[in-house]
């Protein structure tokens, strides 16, 4: 077949591609596991209100978007949600109902709120949503729909997983569609009629779609519903295709859809089944109509045992309940669930000891023993709290990449990683190089890494071979068996032994980073200035300032990256901290900063560190850069960090399954290959506080709050706040939404249990031997068995800054307007420490009564 | 000692009973771990005892005739510590891995039952005892695969496995029934002295082979193993390290019957070799870690059954134990795949060598390791039979492939020296281990009943593998392109386990699908 592209077909193709792009909004774009990036699975729907997006997700995936009413009711019974919370939530969501007069039922009087609460408590539960936007095959022949899914998983898996196989999909260099077309006709699991037609498919996927649409009797202009139904059927595979398409990997959703539609029309035709036109797609379920408001009033009457309610009474009560539909109840419950947490937190912040002033303007204050900047990650709150309790250590919160957007290559690595937030692409390349005098040690380290790699490669070459694996198993089993036993029965000693042996063969060479080569002076000044201004650390520098990134030591864990620093692209944050510390040590940078008004005393030393969130040990990196004059300061700090880490491990032991109260049992998780609960990660996250540490320093935030330091007094034009709200706050919302949805529907938005995970193509996991590529977090990240550890609540942003400054920033940024106005995040603010709280909503700021 | 043997075998089953009786309480699970640990350590002590002294045996006799018995001979001195050791380590692994999982108590109960069944199978001294232990093992596997029965994928695994096992167990019991009908309840030792018509023996041997093929996931009973991944990882470790080996152990234990029929032996070689090619080719196309591992096991078991068919029984047992440990470790560590990928991507850069050097490397690796095999085998493994010697060709392949990969990535003279040294040490160690192992189990394992045709069989098998390799390396398009693409497509389809129905497209073709009622079907991914 020859392709003659006329303007008309070109236009049709363009129209199709845009239809596919619009349909793709319904699915998320999961990153491969090695760069696990938290995201809102409904990110494409953030321009809709939260409740509408949840309803749409129900239609498309059959997914839940909130906890079940039964779970909320249990929380109510347990006191986690009170009637006060429910009333507060009702007045936010259904103010018109709350304004209605009280009604009488029998002899008892019910305020509107009481009546609504009775319905919330006793109303008949809403059924789990069912997928209603379905494909023609789902509609007429569910078996064929399953066959199409299997074929999809088979071919897309073969294409995307090619790098992980020894016999990769032939012809993949021609792109997915062509390679698939050349192979699909040879697939003998299909009826011969289907194979014959497959071999004659058009050369480009758009034409294949057009031909399938013609067969199905769907006008290309009306193909959106069909495209959406197909893309949402296996959201994991489709999402990974979308991710790959953004990286020109030879596959995109158009070819994905071309494959699925071709299979569908051909299989339906082969079985003499009708092709459905577009309008039939939504037909699906008209599930049992929800109970009417009157039914619900009668149910309340029956359950509360109210005798003889008059007709008039019932009618007036019905009017009240009519303002809140059964599907709205979950959102009222969710609002109350969040209100309870937020109100408590706001009251605690408001109760701050009056003596503590904002730290930024603390010229008159004594110099702290040291200042430490940690990541905004909620896990940092734990180490900060325990450290602060042990002396005059001042801490700050800043996104863990320390404004250093780098492409980083370690001493023994052959390639670079992007260590920065995923939405920016690094222009500055930084390499780890040996210190002067350490070149031979580094060479030794590199040689041993290469040798280890050669052995791994040789093993893998024999393992993935046709002739070689048989005796390989015989020879290596005798070594592998005892190793496996040792790793299982004595993981900690085994890990220690391994580390010692590695250090004996090739000790880690002292190194530094090529910051001066990677950045111009101006760039270094720019990013360090941005960081210091953003967190309000511009005066009163301590003798030691530590920039501490974080990483998570875990083994045998496909989701390891989800525990590392999100601001560093799912990598450990040490390199970024080192870059910032090296830049700030540079006299030229300091001089330029002084010109910009930030005077760093000569005796201030910047150090990099990394917090291991599994073991709570904070390692000072590049310890060679500590001058002798500061040895004592650093020793004192190290001791305090060690004590704080110990206390934090003890605190965390309580919630980690099987840890009891033992610090050892917390820390051994870092090296045990059977561990599925290495740490809780960011589970529990519920709020973000943007303001000086003084707001929260007195509170145990239970590692649930993102803390971004901010000093409104040195940010008159709001530039710093705008950066914080458009970058770290947005990322916090991604993380929050990821945990939220992975918890409320652990099957659809979460990736299910780790115990049957099967890493596929190095990209993601499937559950067991087949099926969709899973998205989201595993169960073991949010729950122990059926018991949720993460309380799914939308993020509560709490800011201390002038209200009109915040308002202007929101109105300038569509993304923020979407998040705040559509209810994906709540926002509470106060202009000064003394002032009351104000809640933001679409109509402006509302003062909250002080409690 | 004899009481100790009974305790070691049955303690895990008692622990399983206790778990069931106590409703899976934490104390009962702790007790089960202790019981399994005790059994594993006890097995080692008993094995040492039986090795130093005489075989330990215990039997229940009624009026002088044996009813049931267990024995530690040189074969079970290897297998008993192996099966109970793997069972115990996997349970310790699962203690952590299955925390918070509602299926945890059932896992420990079933795994403990499996431990006893396997321990009894490898030590049973009567034919009926062996078959009974075998079938209790089937029950334990059913329980293990049913841990996540609410998942349709898990139910598919149960269905396929139980179908294969039912056929295999039926064949085994039929064989046992025939023998018992003729000779009564006999011991395995007596099998060597039985007088039976050749036809009868051939039927029995064929039935035993069917049982072994079903348990070891061999063609045409192979479909169950790849469908078992919806059971938690520790279950896979047990299946791949223990359960699938039972086929080989059965053939070794009943070797007097099995070797009595040349035809059955040849069929075993053919099916084993076919499965080895099939499983290994499919493994190469699998991009999911566990899927590749299951097909690798299938291929490895094919190799092992082929080894049995060639009469190289001690080599088969050597393979069983080594592969079991190898594969259990790979399954347990399957979650490390993402990190492996990262390590691979970030691997230190090595300069590729020129063509001339690459050829030199190949010559050193292939020629050198062949030379070492030729020189070292007579010295280190003089007792090797024709079959065992023929099988050494696979040792050569492994050594050559691994060594040439090492040479490829070596940059310095020292690196090359290390590569060559590794190759030599691996070959020498391998030969010495094979020889020592063979000598150790010799008293309990039939002397290699190798046929003179072994070389032809192995040669044919190698030719098929080489042909498959040639197809894999051939260009995608052009002259043999279609063959390449056709074979790839067949392999990919054969290795793909469908989400739910057993063979969806076929089923869809045969039975015209009903028109579904106008209700939404749940998306299969989330069932």
Image: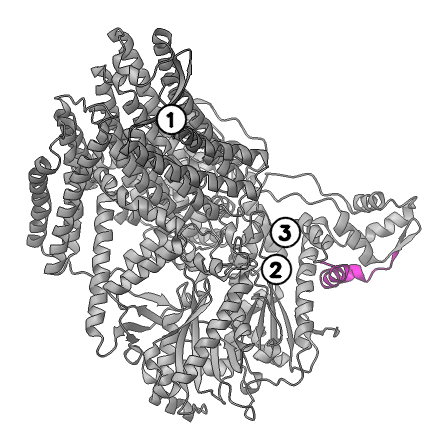
Where does the image place residue A365, in percent across and percent down from the top left? 56, 90
Where does the image place residue B434, in percent across and percent down from the top left? 19, 36
Q: Which mark is residue A653?
A: none
Residues at marks 1 and 2 touching, judged by CB atoms closer than 8 Å? no
| Label 2 environment density (alpha carbons within 10 Å; few <14, some 14–19, many ≥20) | many
| Residue B323 magenta | no
Q: Which span is picked out in magenta?
A: A81-103
Q: Which mark is residue A793?
A: 2
Q: For this rendering, which residue is in front, B355 or A436?
A: A436
Residues at marks 2 and 3 touching, judged by CB atoms closer than 8 Å? no
Q: Is residue B221 visible?
A: no
Which residue is painted at 90% across and 45% down in the image?
A: A311
Residue placed under numbered mark 3 in the picture: A67
Q: Are marks 1 and 2 on the same chain?
A: no
Q: For this rendering, which residue is in front, A623 or A750?
A: A623
Residue B319 versus residue A342 in the image, above or below: above
| Label 1 environment density (alpha carbons within 10 Å; few <14, some 14–19, many ≥20) | many
Q: Are marks 3 and 1 on the same chain?
A: no
Residue A333, picture quadrant: bottom right
């Amino acid at each position: 077949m020859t392709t003659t592209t006329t303007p008309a077909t070109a236009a049709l193709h363009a129209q199709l591609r845009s239809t596919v792009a619009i349909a793709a909004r319904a699915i998320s774009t999961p990153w491969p596991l090695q760069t696990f990036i938290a995201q809102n699975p409904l990110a494409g729907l953030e321009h809709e209100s939260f409740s509408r997006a949840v309803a749409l997700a129900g239609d498309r995936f059959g997914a839940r978007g909130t906890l079940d009413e039964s779970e909320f009711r249990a929380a109510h019974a347990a006191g986690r949600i009170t009637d006060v919370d429910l009333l507060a939530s009702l007045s936010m969501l259904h103010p018109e109902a709350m304004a209605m007069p009280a009604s009488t039922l029998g002899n008892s009087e019910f305020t509107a709120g009481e009546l609504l609460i009775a319905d919330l408590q006793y109303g008949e539960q809403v059924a789990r949503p069912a997928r209603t936007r379905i494909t023609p095959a789902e509609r007429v022949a569910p078996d064929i729909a399953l066959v199409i899914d299997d074929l999809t998983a088979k071919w897309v898996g073969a294409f995307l997983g090619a790098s992980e196989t020894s016999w990769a999909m032939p012809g993949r260099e021609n792109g997915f569609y062509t390679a698939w077309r050349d192979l699909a006709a040879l697939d003998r699991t299909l009826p011969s009629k289907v194979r014959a037609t497959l071999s004659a498919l058009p050369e480009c996927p758009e034409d294949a779609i057009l031909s399938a649409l013609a067969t199905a009797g769907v006008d290309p202009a009306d193909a959106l519903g069909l495209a959406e139904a197909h893309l949402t059927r296996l959201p994991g595979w489709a999402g990974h295709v979308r991710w790959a398409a953004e990286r020109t990997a030879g596959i995109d959703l158009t070819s994905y859809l071309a494959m699925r539609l071709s299979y569908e029309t051909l299989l339906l035709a082969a079985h003499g089944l009708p092709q459905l036109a577009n309008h039939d797609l939504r037909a699906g379920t008209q599930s049992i109509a929800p109970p009417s408001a009157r039914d619900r009033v009668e149910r309340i009457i029956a359950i509360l045992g109210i005798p003889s309610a008059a007709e008039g009474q019932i009618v007036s009560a019905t009017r009240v309940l009519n303002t809140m539909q059964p599907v709205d109840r979950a959102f009222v419950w969710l609002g109350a669930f969040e209100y309870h947490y937020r109100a408590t937190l706001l009251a605690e912040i408001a109760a701050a000891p009056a003596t503590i002033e904002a730290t930024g303007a603390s010229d008159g204050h004594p110099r702290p023993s040291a200042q430490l900047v940690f990541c905004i990650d909620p896990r940092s709150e734990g180490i900060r709290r325990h450290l602060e309790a042990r002396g005059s250590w001042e801490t700050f919160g800043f996104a863990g990449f320390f404004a250093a957007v780098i492409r980083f290559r370690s001493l023994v690595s052959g390639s670079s990683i992007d260590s920065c937030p995923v939405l920016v692409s690094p222009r500055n390349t930084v390499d780890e190089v040996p210190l002067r005098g350490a070149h031979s040690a580094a060479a030794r380290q590199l040689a041993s890494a290469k040798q280890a790699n050669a052995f791994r490669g040789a093993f893998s070459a024999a393992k993935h071979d046709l002739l070689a694996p048989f005796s390989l198993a015989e020879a290596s089993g005798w070594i592998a068996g005892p190793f496996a036993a040792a790793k299982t029965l004595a993981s900690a000693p085994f890990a220690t032994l391994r580390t010692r042996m590695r250090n004996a063969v090739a000790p880690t060479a002292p190194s530094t980073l090529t910051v001066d080569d990677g950045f111009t002076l101006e760039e270094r000044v720019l990013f360090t200035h941005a960081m210091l201004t953003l967190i309000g650390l511009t005066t009163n520098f301590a003798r030691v300032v530590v920039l501490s990134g974080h990483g998570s030591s875990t083994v045998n864990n496909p989701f390891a990256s989800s525990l590392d620093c999100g601001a560093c692209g799912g990598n450990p944050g040490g390199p970024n901290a080192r870059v910032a510390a090296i830049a700030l040590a540079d006299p030229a940078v300091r001089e330029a900063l002084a010109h910009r008004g930030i005077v760093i005393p000569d005796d201030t030393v910047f150090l990099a560190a990394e917090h291991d969130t599994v073991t709570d040990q904070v390692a000072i990196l590049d310890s060679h850069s500590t001058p002798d004059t500061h040895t004592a300061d650093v020793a004192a700090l190290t001791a305090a960090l060690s004590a704080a880490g110990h206390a934090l491990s003890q605190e965390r032991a309580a919630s980690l399954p099987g840890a009891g109260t033992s610090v050892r049992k917390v820390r051994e998780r870092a090296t045990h290959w059977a561990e599925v609960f290495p740490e809780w990660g960011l589970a529990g996250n519920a709020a973000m506080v943007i303001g000086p540490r003084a707001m929260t320093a007195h509170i145990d935030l239970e590692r649930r709050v993102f803390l971004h330091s901010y000093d409104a007094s040195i940010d008159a034009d709001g530039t710093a706040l705008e950066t914080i709200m458009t970058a770290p706050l947005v990322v916090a919302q991604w993380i929050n939404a990821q945990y939220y949805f992975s918890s409320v529907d652990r099957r659809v938005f979460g990736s299910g249990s780790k115990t049957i995970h099967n890493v596929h193509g190095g990209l993601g996991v499937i559950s067991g031997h087949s099926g969709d590529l899973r998205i989201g977090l595993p169960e073991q990240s949010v729950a122990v068995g059926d018991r949720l550890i993460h309380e799914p609540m939308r993020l509560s942003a709490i800011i201390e800054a002038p209200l009109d400054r915040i308002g202007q920033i929101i109105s300038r940024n569509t993304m923020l307007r979407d998040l705040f106005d559509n209810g994906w995040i709540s926002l509470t603010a106060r202009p000064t420490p003394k002032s009351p709280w104000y809640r933001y909503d679409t109509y402006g700021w509302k003062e909250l009564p002080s409690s | 000692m004899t009481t100790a043997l009974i305790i070691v075998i049955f303690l895990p089953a008692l622990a399983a009973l206790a778990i069931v009786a106590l409703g899976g309480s934490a104390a009962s699970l702790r007790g089960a771990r202790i019981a399994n640990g005790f059994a594993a350590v006890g097995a080692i002590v008993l094995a040492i005892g039986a090795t130093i002294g005489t075989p330990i045996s215990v039997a229940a006799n009624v009026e002088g005739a044996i009813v049931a018995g267990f024995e530690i001979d040189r074969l079970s001195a290897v297998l008993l510590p192996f099966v109970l050791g793997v069972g115990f380590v996997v349970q310790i692994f699962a203690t952590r891995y299955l925390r918070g999982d509602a299926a945890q108590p059932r896992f420990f109960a079933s795994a403990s039952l499996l431990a006893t069944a396997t321990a009894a199978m490898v030590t049973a001294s009567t034919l009926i005892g062996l078959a009974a232990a075998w079938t209790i093992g089937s029950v334990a596997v059913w329980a293990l695969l049913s841990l996540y029965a609410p998942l349709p994928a898990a139910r598919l695994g149960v269905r396929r496995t139980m179908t294969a096992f039912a056929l295999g167990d039926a064949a085994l019991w039929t064989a046992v029934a025939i023998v018992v009908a003729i000779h009564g309840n006999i011991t395995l030792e007596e099998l060597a002295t039985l007088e039976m018509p050749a036809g009868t023996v051939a039927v029995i041997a064929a039935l035993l082979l069917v049982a072994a093929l079903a348990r070891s996931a061999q063609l045409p009973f192979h479909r169950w193993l790849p469908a078992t991944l919806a059971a938690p990882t520790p279950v896979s470790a047990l299946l791949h390290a223990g359960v699938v080996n039972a086929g080989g152990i059965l053939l070794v234990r009943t070797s007097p019957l099995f070797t009595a029929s040349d035809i059955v032996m040849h069929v075993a070689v053919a099916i084993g070799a076919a499965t080895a090619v099939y499983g290994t080719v499919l493994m190469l196309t699998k991009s999911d870690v566990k899927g590749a591992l299951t097909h690798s096991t299938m291929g490895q078991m094919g190799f092992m059954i082929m080894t049995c068919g060639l009469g190289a029984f001690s080599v088969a047992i050597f393979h069983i134990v080594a592969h079991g440990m190898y594969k259990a470790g790979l399954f347990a560590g399957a979650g490390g795949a993402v990190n492996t990928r990262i390590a691979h991507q970030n691997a230190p850069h090595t300069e590729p060598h020129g063509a001339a050097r690459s050829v030199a490397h190949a010559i050193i690796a292939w020629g050198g390791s062949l030379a070492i095999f030729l020189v070292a085998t007579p010295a280190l493994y003089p007792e090797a039979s024709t079959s065992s010697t023929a099988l050494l060709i696979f040792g050569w392949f492994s050594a050559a492939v691994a060594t040439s990969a090492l040479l490829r990535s070596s940059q310095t003279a020292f690196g090359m020296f290390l590569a060559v040294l590794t190759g030599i040490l691996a070959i020498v160690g391998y030969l010495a281990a094979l020889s020592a192992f063979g000598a150790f189990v010799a008293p309990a394992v039939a002397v290699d009943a190798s046929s003179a045709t072994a070389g032809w069989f192995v040669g044919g098998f190698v030719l098929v593998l080489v042909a498959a390799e040639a197809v894999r390396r051939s260009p995608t398009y052009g002259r043999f392109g279609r063959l390449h693409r056709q074979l790839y497509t067949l392999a990919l389809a054969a290795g793909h386990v469908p989400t739910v129905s057993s063979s969806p497209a076929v089923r869809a073709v045969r039975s015209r699908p009903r028109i579904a009622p106008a209700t939404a079907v749940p998306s299969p991914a989330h069932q």
